[in-house]
Image: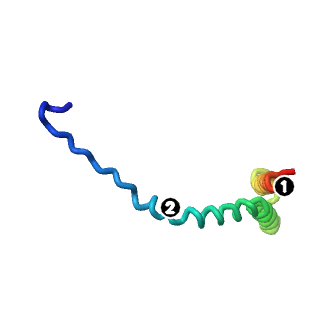
Amino acid sequence: MQIAGAKVQKKSHSKPRITNYFVFLHPILTIYMKFILKYSGLALILLGVLLLAALHLLHFTFVNVVLLTPFFIILAGVVLQVWMMKRESRY
């Protein structure tokens, strides 16, 4: 509530400093994100295979939930890789 005759002070809302850094890094992040997204499917497949091999070497093959984790990682990598390949081809 404002009292008659009282002046309202406006707060200056300056941009946070983090946005200044993001504006500077935006072109660099865009280039690297395209590169990372392009090869992230293969990275997920490799990660899943390495995790599956590590579980086999550690003899954790008797636990189904633990074995399903690398399976879903590999499946996500395959789906992402196929999606990226279809996106790039534009036939």
Q: Disc 2 residue type?
A: Val
Q: Do the residues labelled 1 and 2 touch (CB within 8 Å)?
A: no
Q: Is residue 76 visible?
A: yes
> Could you classify mark 2 by the number of other residues whose Cα lies within 10 Å: few (under 14), some (14-19), or many (20 or more)?
few
Q: How far apart are marks 1 and 2 (CA)?
A: 31 Å
Q: Nearer the viewer, residue 3 or 66?
A: 3
Residue 16 at x, y percent in the picture: 39, 57
Of helix, strand and loop, which one carries label 1?
helix
**Residue 2 in which image quadrant:** top left
- Image quadrant holding the N terminus, namely top left
From the image, tell me which residue sits under label 1. Answer: 89
Q: Residue at left 81%, top 63%?
A: 49
Q: Disc 1 residue type?
A: Ser
Q: Residue at left 79%, top 65%?
A: 46
Residue 7 at x, y percent in the picture: 16, 39
Q: Using residue 84 as the reference point, say whether residue 31 is left or right of it.
A: left
Mark 1 and mark 2 lie on one chain; the one further toward the N terminus is 2
* Scheme by which the image is coloured: rainbow
Residue 34 at x, y percent in the picture: 69, 61
From the image, tell me which residue sits under label 2. Answer: 23
